[in-house]
Image (spheres, rainbow, N blue to C red):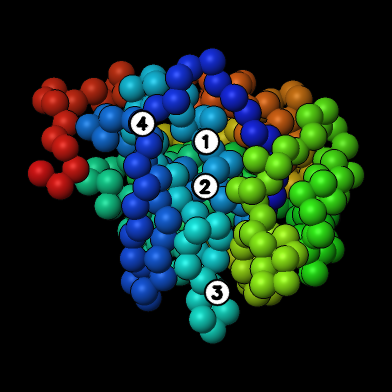
Amino acid sequence: MVLVAANLSTALSDAARRAETLTAHDGVALAIEHFGDEQNAAIVFAHGFGQTRHAWDGTANTLAQAGWHPITADARGHGDSGRRDDGDYHYDQFVDDLVRIARDSGETPVLVGASMGGLIGLAAQALHAPFRALVLVDITPRWESAGVERILAFMRAHPDGFSSYDEAADEIARYLPHRTERKSEASLRQLLVRDDQGRLRWHWDPRMLDFATRDAETLQRDLLAAAATIRVPVLLVSGARSDVVSAETIAEFLAHVPHARHVRLADATHMVAGDANDTFTRVVLEFVQTLQSETAPSNPRPHRGQ
């Protein structure tokens, strides 16, 4: 349920990147991107509702430079990934996709999942255990409905798209008044696509808006039960200014997953990676480095496909 992430730069040089397409169980094409040396230990990134894989570019590049193999993906119906012809989206499809991406890495990777991506990762771990650790970014099994409705209201507000990148940047600035940096055209090209009439539309399938609000109470109950089954290391990173998670939802989550660690970023809203990318990346890197030191393999990792 995170929508817009800042286009943050890194002082490090760009890591090598390789794009590929992975076919989901129902034939939907999933756009995948690999960063850095693919012999390194993998981290799979799952973005929020309405985002694309590019929300993770800054963090993925930094982690690749630090010796990891980040894998980012556009969820079905988002970005360069395919859309369902019938427009019928369900959470189990997204769970299956994420498990497929994890297993295609050739190992048991770490997951970093923001908002919707974190919920999908939580469900995937409870059902299939494809990850060796979870980083959940400003999401808990129960969430604050008012915060989610505020996000969805913005997503519904522009059904006819925008006439220009400037118009889109103006609307985003009004939606995110705490951001001091205006969205550039280059960053907006990752979020918008031009239709046959020349209008710029969000790069996701608008038919997913029905799926996003379907059976919320049942979903939250099931996710809370799923959380209680998680045994792998868990890090929850929340924004102190978030209106999607709260002290109450965080306390409930930690009661169900008592071994989880929690870090709150003081200057971040629900858009944690976009609001405080450098701090967020450092927190993630410290967590995964701890995992690596605890489970360092005794033999070199083979190349994927060997």
The amino acid marked with disc number 2 is Arg
On the image, which quarter does residue 23 sit in? bottom left
Q: Earlier in the sequence, mark 3 or mark 2?
A: 2
Question: 6 or 184, which is in the foreground?
Answer: 184
The amino acid marked with disc number 4 is Ala
Residue at 28% x, 46% y: name it: 105
Q: Earlier in the sequence, mark 1 or mark 3?
A: 1
Question: 49 or 55, which is in the foreground?
Answer: 55
**Residue 79 in sight in this render:** yes
Q: Position of residue 234 (x, y in %)?
A: 47, 36
Q: Position of residue 215 (x, y in %)?
A: 66, 73
18 is higher (above) or lower (below) than 159: above
SS of the residue at dot 1? Answer: helix
Mark drawn on residue 57: 1
Image depth: mark 2 or mark 4 in front: 4
The amino acid marked with disc number 1 is Asp
- Location of mark 4 (residue): 16
- State the separation of the CA atoms marked 4 and 1: 12 Å
Mark drawn on residue 89: 3
- State the separation of the CA atoms marked 3 and 2: 19 Å
